[in-house]
Amino acid sequence: MLSHGSHPETTPLSMTVDRSDPEAPLIRVGGDLAYTTAAPLRAEIDRTLAAAPPALVLDFGDLLFIDSTGLGVIVHAWREGQQAGTALRLRGVPRFLATILDMTGVTGLLDRPLGDGLTARAAPTERPAGTA
C-alpha cells in the first residue's frame, strides 16, 4: 500500500480541469488514484495533451492514496507529454507521494529536460564499422 496511513477502502477519485491558461492547463486530483479509479484521469490527460500545450500541471494537493497504477498514470503523462512537446509539472505533492516518486526514480524522470526522454528510443545505438 502506498499512502500515508491505513486505507482499506477506495475513496473515489476527484478531478477538476482548469483550462483558463491554455499555455498550462491544470488538472487537480484528489481522493484515491488507484487501479479502480485511474482511467478517467488517464483519459483526461490524453485529451489535454492532444492540444499539445507547452505545459500540463497536475495538482495532487488533495490526493489521499496512490498505487502502482496511479504512478503509471503519472509516467504515462510524462511520456505522452514528451511526444507532444509538453512539459509535465507536478504541484501540491503530498509527502507520501514525493517519497514514492523518489524511491521509484520517477522524480529523476520528471526532472529531465523536455525532449530528453525520447533520445534513447529515437536513435538506435550505432557501432563503428569493423567492431562487434
Image: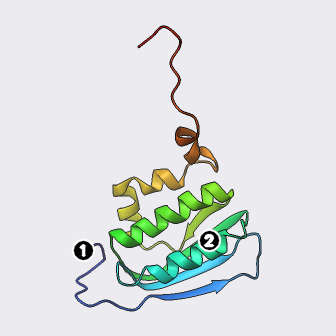
Q: Is residue 86 above or below residue 91?
A: above
- 74 and 62: which is toward the camera: 74
Which x, y percent locates residue 64? 38, 83
Q: Residue at x 50, y 83 (%)?
A: 40
Image x and y of residue 116, in percent: 59, 44
Q: Is residue 94 above or below residue 72?
A: below
Residue 35 shows which numbered tag? none
Q: Secondary structure at mark 2?
A: strand
In this picture, residue 119 sits left or right of residue 105: right
* Image quadrant in which the N terminus is located: bottom left
> Quarter of the image containing the C terminus?
top left
Q: Amino acid at mark 2?
A: Val
Q: Determine which residue is flagged by label 2.
A: 57
| Residue 26 seen in the figure | yes
Q: Amino acid at mark 1?
A: Met
How many circles with numbers are drawn on the protein? 2
Asked if residue 32 is positioned above or below residue 79 in the image, the reply reads: below
Residue 100 spot, x, y in % from top left:
35, 63
Instruction: State the residue at coordinates (43%, 79%).
Output: 38
The residue at the point 58 percent across, 61 percent down is: 80
Residue 108 vs residue 53, the one in the foreground: 53
Q: In the visual, does 72 lie left or right of 117? A: left
Q: Which of the 4 quarters of the picture holds residue 119?
A: top right
- The reply to whether residue 96 is in sight is no
Task: Find disc 1 in the rendering and name its residue.
Answer: 1
Classify residue 33 as left or right of residue 14. Answer: left
Give the class, few, some or many, for how many residues have Cα within 10 Å of label 1's Cα (few <14, many ≥20).
Answer: few
Mark 2 or mark 1: whose residue is earlier in sequence: 1
User: Which image quadrant is residue 27 in?
Assistant: bottom right
